[in-house]
Image: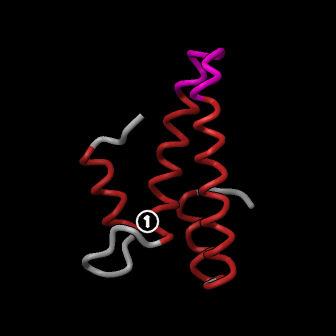
């Protein structure tokens, strides 16, 4: 489920570190979180869509790895992004 261009641009604006930033860990975590939220809504209607569920689990794992990287490198940013995205850890 791709994100709408406007939504993606808005997320990048909210989480970027500098003017040309589109790929930092913070931005990637925000984009993955949005895709994960969209897929969880999809599964409320389509409970037996197991191939998409596998994709969801891959996205969750990728986000988890990025979060652990951010925690190791900058714990303050890690706490900040958890609060902004209302993620629990």
37 over 19 or under it: above or below: above
81 over 49 or under it: above or below: below
28 over 7 or under it: above or below: below
Task: Tell me how the rendering is colored.
Answer: secondary structure
Q: Quadrant of residue 31?
A: bottom left
Q: Which residue is mark 1?
A: 27
Residue sitting nearer the eye, 83 or 45 = 45
Identify the residue at horizontal 60%, vertical 25% (top origin).
Answer: 51
Identify the residue at horizontal 60%, vertical 19% (top origin).
Answer: 49
- Left or right position of 16 against 57: left
43 within the magenta span: yes
Residue sitting nearer the eye, 51 or 75 = 51
Of helix, strand and loop, which mostly describes the magenta segment?
helix
Q: Quadrant of residue 70?
A: bottom right
Residue 19 point in image, percent of width and height: 25, 79
| Secondary-structure class at tag 1 | helix
- Left or right position of 3 against 56: left
Identify the residue at horizontal 69%, vertical 70% (top origin).
Answer: 68
Crowdedness near tag 1: few (<14), some (14–19) or many (≥20) residues, C-alpha within 10 Å: many
- Segment tinted magenta in the rendering: 42-52
- The image quadrant where one finds the N terminus is top left
């Amino acid at each position: 489920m791709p994100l709408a261009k406007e939504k993606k641009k808005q997320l990048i604006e909210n989480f970027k570190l500098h003017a040309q930033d589109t790929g930092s860990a913070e931005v990637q975590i925000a984009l993955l979180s949005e895709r994960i939220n969209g897929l969880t809504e999809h599964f409320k209607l389509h409970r037996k869509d197991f191939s998409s569920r596998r994709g969801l689990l891959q996205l969750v794992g990728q986000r988890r790895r990025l979060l652990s990287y951010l925690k190791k490198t900058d714990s303050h940013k890690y706490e900040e992004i958890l609060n902004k995205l209302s993620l629990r850890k």
